[in-house]
Amino acid sequence: MKLTSNFAGGRLTVEVSGELDHHGAGELMAKLTERLESDLPRECVLDLRELKFMDSSGIAVMMRVTKRMRALGGRLRVENVREQPRRVIEASGIGKIIEIDG
Amino acid sequence: MNEINTVSLDFPSRSVNEAFARGAAACFAAQLDMTMTELGDIKTAVSEAVTNCTVHAYPDSIGTIHMRLRILEGNVLEIQVKDKGRGIEDVERAREPLFTTGGEERSGMGFTIMESFMDSVKVRSRPGAGTTVTMRRRVGRRPAGR
Ligand SMILES: Nc1ncnc2c1ncn2[C@@H]1O[C@H](COP(=O)(O)OP(=O)(O)OP(=O)(O)O)[C@@H](O)[C@H]1O
Ligand SMILES: [Mg+2]
């Protein structure tokens, strides 16, 4: 799991690549929290174009970011989701509470 | 169902082995003709079962995870993941969506995901003794109506 982030115009974009499981989720959450608390974005975008695998550990990360963004009066958007992560998102039902594009 | 092939692996419950376990399962499963979607589903189910051993069965120590993979007659893959860890008090409750004892780091969706990706998921558990999860999925040529 690797991540790069960019903050501009109130929007924090985080690109997560590789495989996201329990092994990498702690580090991802720590880095995301650090960015969210220092940037206080209005919108957080998770760009998953290079994310090749994700399990329920990724769902928990999305739930936590959603909560934090709502507390900040903003929202989370998830973009460019490949087939495997998309199936996990669908099976978990989290697609009903977060915005998924492409 | 007749067994066509099988492999067994024992490995320590280190989180780095989650990727190893799903990779090994995918490698073995590749003997069956299957789609990329099916392969993704199998990797996901393995990842969920193995992560549960790492996180819940052996919360404060490193224990052994046993994984047995079998190919059964009729293009069926069986995955068994077994631990000798803490066990589950109430299996029925544990399988409910969103139920978790793992706090905010977990979503409580692991069993729900295994159930939706596999044809069957059996859980046997005894508190203090351990848990065995056995999952089956028919791959490749799907029977009519699926
Ligand atoms: N191998 C196991 N040993 C002991 N307890 C387990 C085991 N597997 C599951 N459990 C119990 O069942 C609960 C539900 O498991 P499930 O995988 O559905 O969700 P989770 O692991 O809590 O969260 P997620 O899988 O979404 O990260 C766990 O919180 C835990 O209490
Ligand atoms: Mg789980």
Image (spheres, coloured by chain):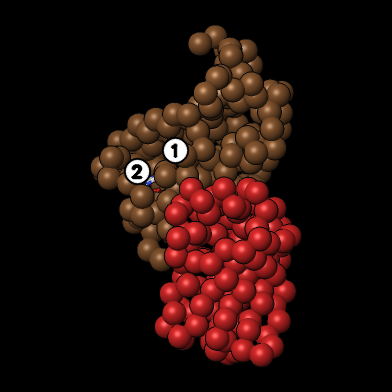
Chain colours: A red, B brown
- Residue ID at (65%, 49%): A83
Query: Is A71 left or right of B80, judged from the image as shown?
Result: left
Can you tell which mark lies on residue A75? none
| Residue situated in front as seen by the camera: A87 or A57 | A87
Report if the beta carbon of the residue with label 2 is closer than 8 angstroms to ligand 1: yes
Report if the beta carbon of the residue with label 1 is closer than 8 angstroms to ligand 1: no
Question: Marks 2 and 1, how far apart in space?
Answer: 9 Å
- Residue ID at (72%, 61%): A49
**Callout 1 environment at 10 Å: few (<14), some (14 to 19), or many (20+)?**
some
* Amino acid at circle 2: Arg
- x, y percent for residue B36: 70, 37
- Marks 2/1 in contact by CB < 8 Å: the verdict is yes
Q: Secondary structure at mark 2?
A: loop
- x, y percent for residue B117: 51, 38
Q: Secondary structure at mark 1?
A: helix
Which residue corresponds to mark 1? B115
Residue A66 visible in the shown view: yes
Residue B70 visible in the shown view: no
Do circles 2 and 1 both sit on a common chain? Answer: yes
Q: Earlier in the sequence, mark 2 or mark 1?
A: 2
Which residue corresponds to mark 2? B95
